Image (tube, rainbow, N blue to C red):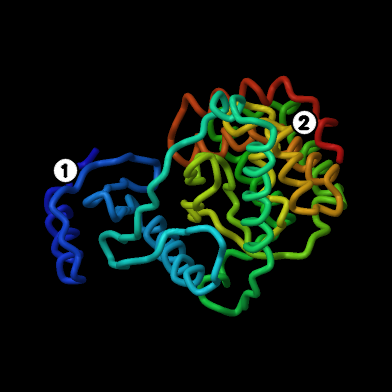
Amino acid sequence: MLNYQDEFYEIRSVLNQLGFQVDKIQYLASGDDSDVLLCGGQFVAKIPKRREVHAAQQREFSLYRFLSRQHLSFQTPRTVYQGEQFNIMTFLPGEPVSFQMYKTLTEREKEALASDEAQFLQELHQIKIDISCGIFQDVVEDKSQRFNQEYTYLCTALKDKGLLSSFLHTKISKIYDNLLSSRELFQYNPCLVHNDFSSDNMVFQNKRLYGVIDFGDFAVGDPDNDFLCILDCSEDDFGKEFGRKVLRHYGHPHPSIAERKAELNDAYWPLQQILLGNRRNDTALLNRGYRRLEKIDPNIFIF
């Protein structure tokens, strides 16, 4: 954690000028991109660590202003202040629901929670947006372009570190050939997506969904992006069976396609580890991805 005493003073000053009396400011968490502070139990301040993060955070907080006008049935953070050094939003109080806690719910409670999540996604995906609007212009998803760029970045990163053998290069090329030839990956009607819709970014109250936070990765893209995490088999969320409940309540026209996309996303994680490890200069993360990539069968990426 950095020493943010000056920022503490500035944050308190800004909130006081806006009519909010805040005495206690405490450090909450630190990520690769931002440090997060809780202010008086009512507000959250995010301090970006890099210039590109500042730009992304400005888009995120502008989106909260946009969402506040959409009359969603569930809470999202509301922007209180946008500035050069930090941004402030409202804090959504709630309690976490872990995988183990979810398992103790009754079947009726599980269905109600799945219905909540499906309703949020239905409302989010139906919002009318104008991609010529500033906050959406730079977040339109192009999967083909993304895969081509990541192929180049991945090969370059491994080559620079002396890890790109001829055999591995052939394997990586086959993986991306399979992905780019999967027609189903590219057939969708673009809409506003959260893009990291997982239980970590949900706020629960009384075993029901109360709100959704952390729209930092939002995009205009494939609605199935918002089912990737909740269809994961791991204990990070509530398991694939719960994800299937959400798909059913959502009324997904092709649930098997959404499931297959989630499986491909999980299989793609080692490549993401390499890309993230290289970007963050995290050798351990890069090496974990590299070791898993060596064992991957490229045919797993055939849709």
Quadrant of res 190: bottom right
User: What residue is pinned by disc 2?
Assistant: 171
Identify the mark nearer the N-term, 1 or 2: 1
Which quadrant does the N terminus fall into?
Answer: top left
Residue 179: assigned label:
none
Instruction: Indicate the position of residue 154 as horizontal and vertical percent values.
Output: 62, 39
Q: Tag 1's secondary structure? A: loop
Residue in the image at 51% along x and 76% along y? 134
Quadrant of res 282: top left
Q: Which amino acid, by three-letter code, is at mark 2?
A: Lys
Q: Which amino acid, by three-letter code, is at mark 1?
A: Asn
Residue 166 position (above or below residue 21): above
Residue in the image at 35% along x and 53% along y? 91
In screen coordinates, is 169 left or right of 3?
A: right
Instruction: Indicate the position of residue 121 as horizontal and vertical percent values.
Output: 65, 56
- Who is closer to the viewer here, 69 or 105? 105
- Who is closer to the viewer here, 57 or 166? 57
User: What residue is pinned by disc 1?
Assistant: 3
Residue in the image at 16% along x and 48% along y? 24
Give the crowd class for mark 2: few <14, some 14-19, many >=20 residues within 10 Å: some
Instruction: Indicate the position of residue 13 as horizontal and vertical percent values.
Output: 13, 64
Q: Tag 2's secondary structure? A: helix
